[in-house]
Image (cartoon, rainbow, N blue to C red):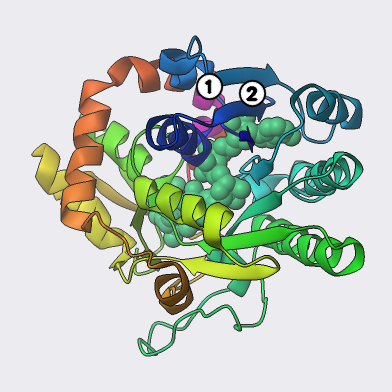
């Protein structure tokens, strides 16, 4: 089979490329990525010469390039990770989120209709469900929870999900959608909570916690997410949504304290800064459907996954030092200076 992985030079997409090449050596993997600020070819360097791998630099919104790739590769499956993914950036500038996350999704699905496809899989997020109150720990997102978004990012992802279901109903496109909770692990871009805190702590820089830090996220080790998607594209039911998450809820402040302890850094580095606009309080996934239909369960415990992740950032300084030495400095200054 030939599997096109869009956004494969980013955090989860690259982990998925590695997962496929390791677990499905019979499959050909073609990564299509625009290499935005979040995409990094050094992330894929170890597989660039792999005989079952091809990298193509292209924008998913560029119809001619996408169609050319389909003509060349005749993919059996498309897994769409390509997206603008950072909520804070979406609050500053929503437009590119609408372009990539919505228009890009429709261009990919048009190509699937034109050239034929076995499966189009949309990598979505639990953020399409909005948030849950902190005082109702009994509530979880199920696949039936209404879409109710908060940020331009989550709204763009929800819009894409609606389009995916519309292409299924209207054109009979064989689609699936996964809605996953927050991932962590290797190659996580340093603007996101966990890598940002590890990297700042290593440099003894302030650890900027938004508001009180009481917001809750349901953290999943990235490899478990990759396994879930792999299960869905092979055995998931067409036209279905699958929630992916691991009953691993943590407050932001707990995570930051844990990182301080692991690195032997003082909690006095923690600095409470102005809260994010529209900040979602709690995300929590009910993974019953993917567990009962596909037998998926998270395998990496948070205590192990976070230590592996911290160790990865210690062992791979070149990867993130190159990233934070560039345009990232301007981003950091804009978002955190005098916050
Ligand atoms: P990321 O920002 O690390 O990577 C995104 C990748 O997409 C980059 O390689 C970038 O170059 C590429 N890209 C961006 N715009 C593109 C375009 N127009 N054409 C082609 N490539 C483009 O993102 P991530 O954290 O790996 O997230 C991947 C997907 O998973 C996204 O769709 C995101 O919404 C979803 N998701 C992420 C999380 C999470 O915790 N990170 C959780 C659930 C779902
Ligand atoms: P993030 O990693 O951006 O993921 P998301 O917003 O998609 O859940 O943020 C995770 C949580 O951490 C979120 O509640 C915002 C918070 N946060 C901080 O407190 N400080 C930071 O510098 C960042 C980037 C995030």
Indicate whether residue 200 is drawn in magenta: no
In the image, residue 249 sits, relative to residue 310, either above or below, namely below
* Residue neighbourhood size for the residue with mark 2, other residues' Cα within 10 Å, grouped as few (<14), some (14–19), many (≥20): some
Where does label 1 land, which residue? 40
Query: Where on the picture, by quarter, is residue 162?
Result: bottom right
Where does label 2 land, which residue? 35
In the image, residue 216 sits, relative to residue 174, either above or below, namely below
Residue range in magenta is 327-333
* Residue at disc 1, CB closer than 8 Å to ligand 1: yes
Secondary structure at badge 1 equals loop
Horizontal side of residue 173 vs 13, given as left or right: right
Q: Residue at x 49, y 50 (%)?
A: 230
Taking the image in four quarters, ligand 1 sits in the one at top right
Q: Residue at x 25, y 52 (%)?
A: 256
Lower sequence index among marks 2 and 1:
2
- Disc 2 vs disc 1: Cβ atoms closer than 8 Å? yes
Alpha-carbon distance for marks 2 and 1?
6 Å
Percent across and percent down for residue 322 are: 42, 15
Percent across and percent down for residue 152 are: 70, 57
* Residue at disc 2, CB closer than 8 Å to ligand 1: yes
In depth, the one of 239 and 142 nearer the eye is 239
Q: Main secondary structure of the magenta part?
A: helix
In depth, the one of 72 and 316 nearer the eye is 72
- The quarter of the image holding the N terminus is top right
Q: Mark yes or no: residue 96 visible.
A: yes
Indicate whether residue 328 is drawn in magenta: yes
Q: Residue at x 73, y 57 (%)?
A: 156
Q: Mark yes or no: residue 37 visible.
A: no
In the image, residue 177 sits, relative to residue 308, either above or below, namely below
Percent across and percent down for residue 139 are: 43, 87
């Amino acid at each position: 089979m030939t599997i096109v992985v869009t956004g494969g030079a980013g955090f989860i997409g690259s982990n998925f490329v590695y997962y496929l090449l390791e677990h499905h050596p019979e499959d050909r993997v073609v990564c299509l990525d625009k290499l935005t600020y979040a995409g990094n070819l050094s992330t894929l360097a170890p597989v660039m010469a792999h005989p079952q791998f091809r990298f193509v630099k292209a924008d998913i919104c560029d119809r001619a390039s996408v169609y050319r790739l389909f003509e060349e590769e005749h993919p059996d499956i498309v897994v769409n990770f390509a997206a603008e993914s950072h909520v804070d950036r979406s609050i500053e500038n929503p437009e590119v989120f609408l372009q990539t996350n919505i228009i890009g999704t429709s261009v990919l699905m048009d190509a699937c209709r034109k050239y034929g496809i076995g499966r189009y899989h949309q990598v979505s997020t639990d953020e399409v469900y909005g948030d849950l109150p902190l005082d109702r720990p009994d509530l979880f997102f199920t696949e039936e929870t209404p879409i109710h978004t908060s940020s331009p990012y989550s709204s763009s992802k929800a819009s894409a999900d609606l389009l995916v279901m519309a292409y299924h109903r209207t054109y009979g496109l064989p689609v699936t959608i996964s809605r996953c909770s927050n991932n962590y692990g290797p190659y996580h871009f340093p603007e996101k909570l966990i890598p940002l805190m590890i990297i700042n702590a290593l440099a003894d820089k302030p650890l900027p916690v938004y508001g009180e830090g009481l917001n809750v996220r349901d953290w999943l080790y990235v490899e478990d997410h990759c396994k879930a998607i792999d299960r869905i594209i092979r055995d998931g039911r067409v036209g279905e949504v699958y929630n992916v998450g691991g009953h691993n809820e943590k407050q932001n402040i707990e995570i930051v304290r844990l990182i301080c302890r692991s690195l032997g850094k003082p909690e006095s580095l923690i600095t409470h800064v102005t809260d994010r606009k529209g900040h979602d309080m709690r995300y929590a996934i009910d993974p019953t459907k993917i567990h009962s239909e596909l037998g998926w369960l998270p395998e990496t415990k948070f205590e192990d996954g976070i230590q592996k992740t911290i160790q990865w950032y210690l062992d791979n300084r070149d990867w993130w030092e190159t990233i934070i030495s560039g345009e990232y400095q301007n981003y950091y200054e804009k978002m955190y200076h005098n916050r």
